[in-house]
Image: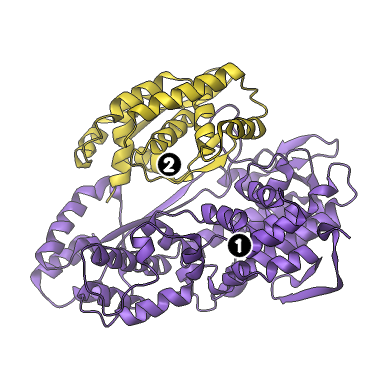
């Protein structure tokens, strides 16, 4: 039997707290799960620094990736199979793309990418297309199969329906992370009736659409997403931890570039500091490696690096205050001057950070937004954009919410020093 | 702080006015591909390379009062036009001086239609491929736009012209 059609002699199942069971029958999927690049995802947390706020949020990208695979498998095997709009030939590429869509994420992804100017999506492409175990498994299906999977993840695959399963405003990726993150953080938001949504999903030529009768389940999903963003993903304390993490990496990079003699040489980072790294070096990094360096750097002679690492490891995070850049950008200049006067380097100890989310957006012909909207399929087969039918969704459609904060080490400023008092007064507005 | 915001204000100031969000997205992407230092991350979307970060930055700049957004109903389509406000001009004082080649490149880009810039930016999105594969890829992801061979050639010539003026 051709490798692409090969089934395991017995179905394998992963016990999963969100989907109860994750089912694997395809040999290709099982082989991909067992590659070293996929196993590496066990060592990358799904929510980065969020565990410093919600202590349960220790779950990994490995779990999420399996979850996305399982949702797509259910959509295809239980929902689309046998429907004329669905091409069964696309099943395996869709399942592989679902499983592997986050393969390029690095440790504390967003912070790491920001400092080293990287893009995890490019690493996903590289892992799929270069000499890796994942590539070898995919190539056994056919020589062009790795490229097909890469194209689905890159959204350049000709079959847009397949792309929309993994990347759209209602896709398997979001449906898994909302539920999984809600479960592990322990919050009561993020829950919606996914079973219902899966039952009312219908394939069309270009994208997945939802039967009109499933509109209320989709409303619930959109509202869940909205609440999760503001209650969990943009939590200001978790952002404080991320701010410190970014500053640690910036400081280490700066020290390396200026010839500082590290007590603990940053072997794993040197090629990144020099912007000359290879894929193998990227894959070798995980959160355990970073946290080990942070522990060791707490003993460095450089007081900024040692202090920032201590703050991260021992959770002595920066305080935050509301900040409106429109009216306060002049005040920020004043703060920089004051920080320098009191011997605090503003590059590391005075940080502004913004969060923003657009919960749902609709399509305006010919211009504007580039997000593909969610369509409801009416009984007569016509399609209608969701916000035209739902008052709840219309209320939040196209409305972006943004939040700006300024972060600073309050603990270093509460000592009665008049200049410190002045800084605090400015910061607290 | 706000250095990336300042670069966008500077870009619109140099363009004098940018007509259409799509056009602005593609102009910044092409400049970024020509090594001008814009930080916004791009992905391939419905109309080619698109940056959610840029959308957000522009919305913030409008909220801050540094950019003025004007809505124009063109009948068959609608578009938003952007200009720098007086307050934005004051804010520009915090920006670093632009690269010497930037004003000319912006001028050339602003002369082009958004359809043409969509083609150029999408070709650039696939610039790691050979020319033939680049064209094939664009024909797949932009199949509904039916770009002609002549348009393709014009786009490649334009990319070459931009590369000559780019930041090395």
Measured as percent of width and height from the top left, residue B34 is found at: 38, 35
| Quadrant placement of the N terminus of chain A | bottom right
**What residue appears at the point 55 percent right and 68 percent down from the top-left corner?**
A46
**What residue appears at the point 81 percent right and 55 percent down from the top-left corner?**
A76
Q: In the displayed structure, does residue A186 sit left or right of residue A26?
A: left
> Which chain is represented by yellow in the image?
B
Q: In the displayed structure, does residue A180 sit left or right of residue A120?
A: right
Can see residue A193? Answer: no
Measured as percent of width and height from the top left, residue A309 is found at: 32, 76
Q: Secondary structure at mark 1?
A: loop
Which chain does the numbered disc 1 sit on? A
Task: Check the image and report above or below for A363 versus A30.
Answer: above
Q: Are marks 2 and 1 in contact (CB under 8 Å)?
A: no
> Which chain is represented by purple in the image?
A
Circle 2 residue: B54
Task: Please rate how many residues cluster around mark 2, counting C-alpha atoms within 10 Å: few if below 14, some from 14 to 19, many from 20.
Answer: many
**What residue appears at the point 30 percent right and 69 percent down from the top-left corner?**
A319
Q: Nearer the viewer, residue A278 or A394?
A: A278
Task: Please rate how many residues cluster around mark 1, counting C-alpha atoms within 10 Å: few if below 14, some from 14 to 19, many from 20.
Answer: some
Q: Marks 2/1: CA distance?
A: 34 Å
Disc 2 versus disc 1: nearer the observer: 1
| Quadrant placement of the C terminus of chain A | bottom left
């Amino acid at each position: 039997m051709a490798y692409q059609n090969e089934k395991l002699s017995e179905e394998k199942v992963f016990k999963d707290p969100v989907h109860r069971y994750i089912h694997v029958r395809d040999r290709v999927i099982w082989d991909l799960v067992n590659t070293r690049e996929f196993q590496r995802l066990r060592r990358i947390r799904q929510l980065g620094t969020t565990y410093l706020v919600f202590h349960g949020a220790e779950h990994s990208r490995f779990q999420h990736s399996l979850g996305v695979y399982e949702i797509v498998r259910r959509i295809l095997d239980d929902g689309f199979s046998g429907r004329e709009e669905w091409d069964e030939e696309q099943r395996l590429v869709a399942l592989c793309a679902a499983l592997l869509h986050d393969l390029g994420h690095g440790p504390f992804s967003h912070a790491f990418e920001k400092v080293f100017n990287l893009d995890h999506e490019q690493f996903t492409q590289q892992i799929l297309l270069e000499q890796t175990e994942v590539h070898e498994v995919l190539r056994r299906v056919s020589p062009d199969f790795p490229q097909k999977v890469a194209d689905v993840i890159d959204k350049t695959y000709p079959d847009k329906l397949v792309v929309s399963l993994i990347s759209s405003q209602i896709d398997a990726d979001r449906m898994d992370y909302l539920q999984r993150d809600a479960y592990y953080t322990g919050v009561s938001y993020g829950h919606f009736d996914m079973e219902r949504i899966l039952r009312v999903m219908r394939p069309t030529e270009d994208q997945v659409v939802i039967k009109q009768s499933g509109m209320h389940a989709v409303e619930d999903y959109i509202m869940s997403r909205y609440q999760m963003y503001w209650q969990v993903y943009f939590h200001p304390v978790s952002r404080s931890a991320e701010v410190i993490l970014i500053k640690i990496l910036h400081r280490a990079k700066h020290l390396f570039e200026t010839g500082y003699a590290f007590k603990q040489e940053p072997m794993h980072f040197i090629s990144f500091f020099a912007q000359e790294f290879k894929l193998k070096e990227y894959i070798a990094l995980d959160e355990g490696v970073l946290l080990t360096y942070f522990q060791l750097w707490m003993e460095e002679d450089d007081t900024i690096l040692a202090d920032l690492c201590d703050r991260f490891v021992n959770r002595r995070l920066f305080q935050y205050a509301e900040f409106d850049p429109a009216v306060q950008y002049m005040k920020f200049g004043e703060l920089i001057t004051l920080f320098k006067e009191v011997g605090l380097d503003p590059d590391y100890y005075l940080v502004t950070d913004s969060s923003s989310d657009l919960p749902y957006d609709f399509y305006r012909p010919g211009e504007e937004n580039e997000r593909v909207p969610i369509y409801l399929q009416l009984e007569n087969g016509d399609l209608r954009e969701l916000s035209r039918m739902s008052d709840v969704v219309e209320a939040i459609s196209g409305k972006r919410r943004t939040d700006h904060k300024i972060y600073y080490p309050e603990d270093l400023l509460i000592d009665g020093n008049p200049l410190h008092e002045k800084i605090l007064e400015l910061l607290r507005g | 702080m706000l250095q990336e915001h300042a670069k966008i204000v500077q870009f619109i100031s140099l363009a004098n006015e940018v007509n259409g969000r799509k056009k602005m997205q593609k102009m910044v992407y092409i400049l970024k591909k020509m090594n001008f230092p814009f930080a916004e991350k791009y992905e391939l979307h419905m109309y080619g390379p698109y940056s959610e970060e840029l959308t957000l930055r522009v919305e913030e700049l409008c909220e801050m009062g540094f950019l003025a957004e004007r809505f124009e109903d063109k009948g068959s389509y609608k578009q938003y036009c952007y200009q720098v406000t007086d307050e934005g001009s004051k804010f520009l004082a915090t920006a670093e001086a632009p690269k010497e080649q930037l004003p000319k490149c912006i001028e050339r880009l602003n002369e082009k239609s958004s359809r043409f810039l969509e083609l150029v930016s999408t070709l650039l999105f696939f610039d790691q491929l050979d020319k033939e594969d680049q064209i094939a890829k664009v024909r797949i992801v932009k199949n509904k736009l039916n770009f002609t061979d002549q348009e393709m050639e014009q786009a490649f010539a334009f990319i070459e012209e931009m590369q000559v003026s780019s930041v090395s």
